[in-house]
Image (cartoon, grey):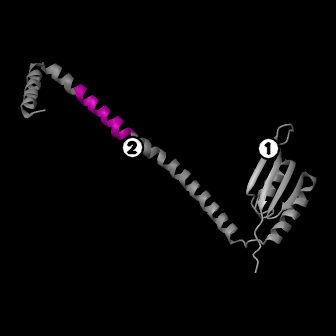
Amino acid sequence: MSLMSHMAWQQWLKARWAALAAREQRGVLLAATVSGAALVWFVALAPALHSLKTVAAQRAALSADIDRMQALQARAKALQAKPALVAQESLHALQTAATKLGAAVSLQVIGEQATLTVKKLSALQLGQWLAPQTGPGLSPTEAHLKRDTGSVEPVWSGTLIYRLPVTATP
């Protein structure tokens, strides 16, 4: 917009304003003030007040997230600090843990791979088996489990495949 047209626009507005009665001028000023106040409220103040109201809940949620992550970090460090099992110890740990579960499981070892087949194992037993503190101490490299829907209590069937540590040859 050129300077000339800008000046023409200002002159037209001044002429239009002067043509209005005093009552109409007050009405236009009141409408402009209310519109400006509403604009300031909806654009600047309302979002800021909403942020202030929700900051405490967000801070508590973030603090809980940090606590969970620190607990996971401590658990990971504890697992990393555990000495690595040699192949024979790993196999023995798997066999011992499998015999505790009874007839619901069978263990087959071929080379460096152990396959545990589970049939109708309860969710509690499966959870205890997979927990590093109570299970064999190894994590499966593959899990192919399916929930049996025919029973009232949740039971699982399938296979867990473990990779045994390689024994270093001197």
Q: Residues within 10 Å of mark 1 (few under 14, many from 20)?
A: few
Name the mark on residue 165.
none
Residue lying farthest to the right in this orientation: 103
Name the mark on residue 48.
2
> At 79% across and 44% down in the image, what residue appears?
146
For the N terminus, the image quarter is top left
> At 84% across and 61% down in the image, what residue appears?
110
> At 9% across and 24% down in the image, what residue appears?
12
Q: Nearer the viewer, residue 122 or 103?
A: 103
Say left or right for 19 vs 54. left
Image-quadrant location for residue 130: bottom right
Image-quadrant location for residue 141: bottom right
Against 4, residue 83 (above or below) is: below
Q: Say which label, 1 or 2, has the lower sequence index.
A: 2
| Amino acid under disc 1 | Lys
> At 57% across and 58% down in the image, what residue appears?
66
Which dot, 1 or 2, sits closer to the camera? 1
x%, y% of residue 61?
55, 51
Which region is colored magenta? 30-46
Mostly what secondary structure, the magenta segment? helix
Q: Nearer the viewer, residue 153 or 112?
A: 112
| Circle 1 SS class | strand
| Circle 2 SS class | helix
The residue pinned by badge 1 equals 146
x%, y% of residue 2?
10, 33
